[in-house]
Amino acid sequence: MPMNKLLQSAVWILIAILGAAAVGGIALNRGESINALWFITAALCIYALAYRFYAAWIAATVLMVDDTRATPAERLENGHDFIPTNRWVVFGHHFAAIAGPGPLVGPTLAAQFGFLPGTLWILFGSVLGGCVQDMVTLFLSTRRDGKSLGQMARDELGALGGSAALIGTFTIMVILIAVLGLVVVNAMKHSPWATYTVGATIPIAMVVGTYMRHFRPGQVLEATTLGVIFLLLAVVGGGWVDNNPSLRGYFDHEGLTLAWCIMAYGLAAAVMPVWLLLAPRDYLSTFMKLGTISLLAVAILFLHPDIKMPAITPFIDGTGPIFGGKLFPFVFITIACGAISGFHALIASGTTPKLLANERDIRMIGYGGMLLESFVAIMAMIAATVLDPGVFFAINSPAGIVGAEAADAVAKISSWGFPVSVAQMQTLAQQMGEATLFARTGGAPSLAVGMASIFGSLFGEGLLALWYHFAIMFEAIFILTTLDAGTRVGRFMLQDMLGNIWPKMADTSWTPSVVITSSIVVACWGYFLYIGVIDPNGGVNILWPLFGIANQMLAAIALSVATGILVKSGKLKYAWVTGLPLTWLIIITGTASYEKITSSDIRVGFFAAANDLSSKLEAGTLPAAKSAIAPQLIFNLHFDAYLTLFFVSLLALIVLDMLRVCTLYLLGKTVKPLSEAPHSPSRLQEDWVRD
């Protein structure tokens, strides 16, 4: 064996040993503090091994990626949706689109079980499930003219399972975007810094897009440098505006105003040419995201803080204060985007395949993009667990669980074995520039506190308030890039659906179809957002409890379609690549749905909570304020229960139809032919593609 081969083998063996030691140290730790460096080491080693070997094997052997084959972006180029784009721009757009609140908030909330369960799920769920789903879906859509997930299901499985997939994916997508929209509104509400910076990214993106398209085509480095400079100025300018009394009022808005602005932006992102707004904005947002996460990683390397949260907490039995439910299955539902997320399949079968210039980049964009998001989730887990557990639970526990008064809350939390004091929380709130940090539920505030604490330790505690508000603004940018891409993907999905009735509607170049379908999609999620903003018990607030389960069901739909196509392609021996994560998702979503419907625990079961409220309302034991809204809350709980049943039924129908098609194929019976587009050689110049 040549010396360089021996050296490479030795390096990879060392990486494997180091990764195994890091994972072992995290998993076997009991009672002693563990350093955050082990988390970063474990993640980087596992990601490197998975990308180098598992992803490469899937791309070469299972998918048989062909870099000489023309992609839809080349064959169907129309200057609007299908545009061959530099791979780094596509990577930036794809990562920004998939990396929403999930990798930030999910691990933070799941830390109530301890650091170990969530960390292991993030590491191994991503490399074996999430990355595989994203890469395979991107490949399959690229081979099918950039078709949406639901349309691929209809083309490959047939009318029954395909129609169920079309309805299921579109409905779930509306729920996910509406929830994301409310998160963005809450993050920007009365935050001039966040509003100014997020708003500034829109004209900056249009300048960069125009620069790359018309002034200096192909000069990505120049455009990137220009965009990053403007972006940094926008961040600094946001802080300046926030502290300027004469300008602050222009960017200090109520939730409803911001909701209308977000709807208008979503419509523009769906209608305008992808090169002008969506792709460059998401690409530039990636620099903000990766820059912040990289800075956080560097701070951890310098400070090597200890993890203060125990590996396992007593709350694995379902008595957790942040949310109800046992460790299994709810840790796998709470952490979605950091491990596996169905929303990614919508992006991988929506905007990304229409921009991909070469199939060779599918591994980097699909598998690599998800690895990067998983690393973000690891950073979020570290930021949450380096906080004192008492502080963590004081921030994230609802007042209804620990008490409305600060003294009651600290007494309750301290009784769990996680000591915290009122003075400690008051001092922390003052440092962060907040009136109080008690009961700031949702995960985002505690994540911002954790990030600010790490940055403050490195750069000086006098800047804690600055870092805290920067983290809040950072989360808003993170989420909005998912909302805009999701809206455009929703437009593609609706065009595919209506195209089955009127083929002209499936033409992404036909302006009436673009405008009509985009308006319908925005109206769908915008309605739930609008009602949710004006009514804390209506609209999107009804759908919040379905977010995690619906997202994981969407991933199961994507893996069902992928498994069926692999079998129909004569690759039965490789079907386990998607079949195993599919089986796991069916188990966890099925179990979670069963518990949400049948559990007698009012913090878990929809019907149990509705019945409890009904009995208290009839007995007259509810406070007057709660009595007034109880009928609506009861309706919401019943609505969520029946919608969960609906989604479970759709998933079962799709999986059974996939198994039917696979069985017929293996028995030699007639099935729908593969819908893969014919091979067409690429004519793009290699130096342009590799620019």
Image (cartoon, rainbow, N blue to C red):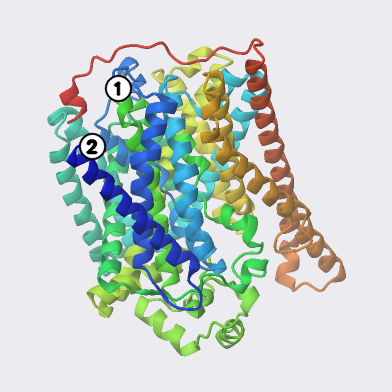
Which comes sooner in the sequence, label 1 or label 2?
Answer: 2
Q: Pinpoint residue 60: horizontal percent, then vertical percent.
A: 37, 28
Q: Pinpoint residue 563: horizontal percent, then vertical percent.
A: 56, 29
**Nearest the camera: 37 or 244?**
37
**Image point 30% across, 68% down: which residue?**
300
Q: For the residues marked 1 and 2, what is the alpha-carbon distance in whole angstroms? A: 29 Å
Of discs 1 and 2, which sits in the foreground?
A: 2
Indicate which disc residue 535 carries.
Answer: none
Residue type (three-letter) at the residue carrying disc 1: Asp
Q: Which residue is mark 2?
A: 1
| Residue 513 visible to the viewer | yes
**Nearest the camera: 218 or 216?**
218
Q: Is residue 553 above or below residue 354?
A: below
Q: Pinpoint residue 632: horizontal percent, then vertical percent.
A: 72, 56
Count the marks: how many?
Answer: 2
Q: Which element carries disc 2, helix, strand or loop?
A: loop
Q: Residues within 10 Å of mark 1 (few under 14, many from 20)?
A: some
Q: Which residue is mark 1?
A: 67
Q: In this rendering, would 246 be left or right of 362?
A: left
